[in-house]
Amino acid sequence: MTDEKSPRISPRAVMGHNGGPTLEKGHSYRTFMWRQAQKQLLPNAVPLMVVRMRVKRAAELGMDYKTYASFRQYSGQDILGLLFSSNALGILDPLRRGPAMPTKEREALERIENAAKLVLVHAPLTPGVVAEANPVIDAAGTAPTLRESWSDTRVRLENFARAHHVSGNRLVIVGDAPLEQDWTAALRAAGYLPADRYFPHRAGTSAI
């Protein structure tokens, strides 16, 4: 027998090891550094063709590229519809001005392509009257009220989206009141835009 010690074999030398961090002392730090190195090996830039396609899609939805890209990244999917409140569309005084949206809002909706244009209507407006007065929209429904519970609000929103064949996470909500911003979480929507961001001519007039 000899007193020679057996050579220590590094876990990295074992057949089949993926080159990841060892489980020895300092494991957490090595894991962090290993993941950072992996990220550096991955392409950081989105291919130009993809960027062009997304710029075009953002324009179809009436959004700037950065806004659209953030919603797409959050949802993991393309945006297939916009859900407006009647407030966001400027239908605020139906008794005096009638149920038709103002000209600039209507023109903005007319420019939307390949996306559902949905509206939730606050009382005293009714969905049928608003839909008839605004043929540019695809469908109208009754907006949740403050009297409804959170679960009732969620069910109302989900049923409305489902009825028009768009899942909540592929919708962006455009609103003009704190209550309407809450619809985003209830529906698990891709995102929320205040009306004064979606309609630039409304800058400084939003209730948010």
Image (cartoon, rainbow, N blue to C red):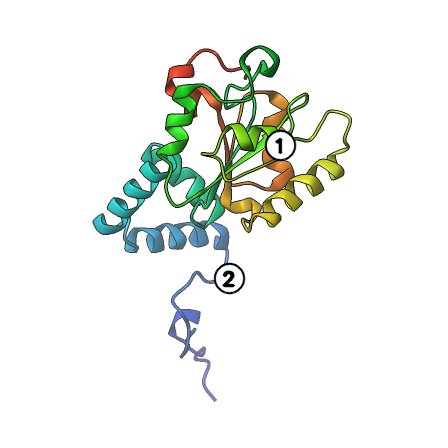
Any mark on residue 23, and which? Answer: 2
> Which residue does the image show at 45% across and 77% down from the upper left?
5
In the rendered image, residue 20, in percent from the top left (x then y), is placed at 41, 63
Reply above or below: 197 against 4.
above
Q: Nearer the viewer, residue 3 or 199?
A: 199
Report helix, strand or loop for mark 2.
loop
Query: For this rendering, which residue is in front, 8 or 200?
Result: 200
Give the residue at the far bottom of this rendering: 1
Q: Are marks 1 and 2 in contact (CB under 8 Å)?
A: no
Residue 102 sits in which quadrant? top left
Q: Is residue 45 visible?
A: no
Residue 88: horizontal and vertical position, in percent? 52, 23
Mark 1 residue crowding within 10 angstroms, few (<14) / some (14–19) / many (20+): many
Of marks 1 and 2, which one's residue comes earlier in the chain?
A: 2
Is 191 situated above or below 31?
above
Q: Is residue 41 left or right of residue 108?
A: left
Q: Residue at x 33, y 43 (%)?
A: 57
Please tell me which residue is depicted at 48% across the width and 89% down the height of the picture: 1
Image check: 28 left or right of 203? right
User: Who is closer to the viewer here, 115 or 126?
Assistant: 126
Q: Is 81 left or right of 47, judged from the image as shown?
A: right
Tell me the CA gap for discs 1 and 2.
62 Å
**Mark 1 or mark 2, whichever is nearer to me:** 1
- Residue underneath mark 1: 127
- Percent across and percent down for residue 18 are 40, 69
Q: Which mark is residue 152?
A: none
